[in-house]
Image: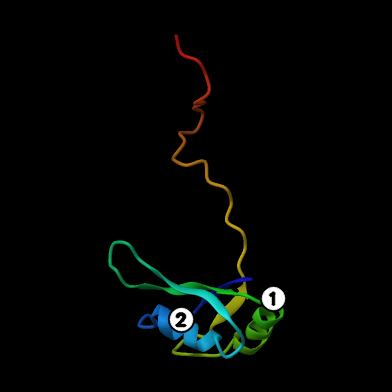
Amino acid sequence: MNLFVAGLPYDLDDAELEEIFEKFGKILSAKVSIDRETGKSRGFGFVEMANESEAKEAIENLNGISLGKKPMVVKAAEDRPKSSGGYKRPGFDSNRRRY
């Protein structure tokens, strides 16, 4: 089960995020989101846990606790909408034939 985690301290790294969640079960991955331009944490991340019941336990126990100044938000991650792969101009139909 994939979890979304917000309200993370900006100095928290992937290993520390994994350490917080591994108390509840097996972690498949833990990734803090990093800003491409600054190289600094964006204050949120994702944790993938192997077992759904362990993930739900982590949500129940960690949602709302404070690691820093802000309370953490821990919830099931929503599926990302399928991207079309690029920017589309409004009113432009790329499938329209041109002669």
Residue 93 versus residue 78 in the image, above or below: above
Alpha carbon separation for disc pair 1 and 2: 22 Å
In the structure shown, which secondary structural element does the residue marked by tag 2 occupy? loop
Residue 10 location, x and y as percent?
Answer: 37, 80
Query: Type of residue at label 2?
Result: Leu
Residue 11 location, x and y as percent?
Answer: 35, 83
In the structure shown, which secondary structural element does the residue marked by tag 1 occupy? helix
Residue 40 location, x and y as percent?
Answer: 32, 72
Q: Who's the residue at 58% across and 82% down the image?
A: 26
- Give the residue at the far top of this rendering: 99
Query: Type of residue at label 1?
Result: Glu
How many numbered tags mark residues here? 2
Q: Which residue does the numbered mark 1 point to in the structure image?
A: 52
Q: Who's the residue at 59% across and 86% down the image?
A: 64
Q: Who's the residue at 53% across and 23% down the image?
A: 95
Question: As drawn, is 78 to the left or to the right of 7?
Answer: right
Q: Which residue does the numbered mark 2 point to in the structure image?
A: 8
Tell me the quarter of the image containing the C terminus. top left
Question: As drawn, is 33 to the left or to the right of 24?
Answer: left
- Res 53 quadrant in image: bottom right
| Residue density around tag 2, few if under 14, some if 14–19, many if 20 or more, within 10 Å | many
